Structures are given as structure tokens and as C-alpha cells.
Amino acid sequence: MKVAVYPGSFDPITLGHLDVVVRANRLFDRVIVAVAKREEKHPLFSWEERIALARQATAGIAGVMVEGFDGLLVDFVRAKGADAVVRGLRAVMDFDYEFQMALTNRKMAPEVETIFFVPSEKFFYLSSSLVRELARAGAELSCFAPPVVVAALKKKFGEKV
Ligand code: PNS
């Protein structure tokens, strides 16, 4: 049984994240979407809210589960007995950060492989921060975020969204 961990802040989970989940799910028997606590980043949604939104957004995808984690990613990966860490790689802007993270994780846990998935070009410039910004400005969000997230953003920012 091959297990992948897909970590992130997921503040909130977007259609770009879900695209990566679906791609990873084709190659792995189980994909654990791992929602990092990261309260030092002052996320818009609380840890519990981000976990709940990710859970609802992935509810229809067999083989995918959502869990929260705090502390080092490699500790979580080892505790789950997972085979790989999965991340989405968009335009070149992601490369430095992702490379640094993958190599740091390898230094700490040489047995954990990082695998990058290229999302659909529809989502190449999509990020959670863009979704938050659009929501604040009252933009239409249905092509960027799953319905549960659109509803949660409406609740946060009022009916403008
Ligand atoms: O969605 P993000 O914010 O780009 O995700 C970054 C995340 C949560 C995957 C990364 O910050 C992380 O793994 N944090 C846990 C702490 C850790 O293990 N840090 C070392 C990785 S270099």
C-alpha cells in the first residue's frame, strides 16, 4: 500500500490543491492531506476550520483523508508510515521554496521522497492568498475554490462574495 502525504497550510483549500489531490490519488493507494497548524502565520481560517474545509472538499474522493499536523513534516510522514511527500509545482515562482523544503526534509529524513505534480494550467497562477484577496474584494470565486470554501468565505466577508 503506497501512501502519500500532501502537506500545506490550505488557508483555504483551492481547486488547484484539489487538482493535485486527484493527480496524486491516481498514483497512490492513499493520500493524506496534512493541514499544518502554522498559527504563527496568522491564517484567515483557524486550524480546525482549514481541516474541516479540506475534509468537506475532498469528501467525495475515495482514498483521500485529511488530518492536521503540528511540528515537523518528516515526523508526521514517519508516524504515518508514508512513502512520499507530494507538492504541487506551479510557475517558476514556486521552485526555490519547494527545492529548499524538499532538500531540508531529505536531510532530516533521507528515506522520504518528495514528488511534485504539475497542476492543470487553469490553476497555474492560483493560490490561497489570491483566493483570500479576491474574497475580500467581493469577486466571484467559483472557478477558484470548491463550493464549501466559497460559502465559508461568504460567511467571513459577508454576502459580497
Ligand atoms: O501551503 P504552504 O504554506 O506552502 O505549506 C508549507 C508547509 C506547511 C508544507 C511547510 O511549512 C511545512 O512542512 N511545515 C511544517 C514544519 C516543517 O517540517 N518544516 C521544515 C520543512 S522545510
Image: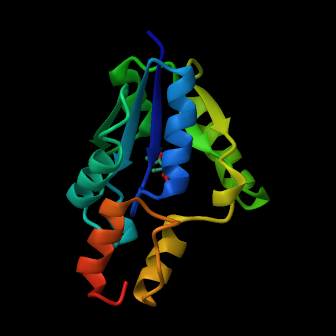
Q: Residue at x 46, y 68 (%)?
A: 142
**Percent coordinates x, y for residue 31 in the rendering:** 43, 29
Which quadrant of the figure contains the C terminus? bottom left
Q: Residue at x 30, y 85 (%)?
A: 157
> Looking at this view, is 128 or 77 the one in front?
128
Q: How is the image coloured?
A: rainbow
In this orientation, does residue 112 appear?
A: no
Q: Residue at x 28, y 87 (%)?
A: 159
The residue at the far top in this view is: 1
**Where 40 falls versus 114 (above or below)?**
below
**Where 159 falls versus 27 (above or below)?**
below
Q: Residue at x 66, y 54 (%)?
A: 97
Left/right of residue 130 with respect to residue 62 in the rendered view: right
**Percent coordinates x, y for residue 33 in the rendering:** 39, 39
**Percent coordinates x, y for residue 27 in the rendering:** 57, 21
**Percent coordinates x, y for residue 155 in the rendering:** 23, 78
**Where 86 falls versus 15 (above or below)?**
above
Which quadrant of the figure contains the N terminus? top left
> Looking at this view, is 44 or 148 the one in front?
148
How many marks the image carries: the answer is 0
In this orientation, does residue 47 appear?
A: yes
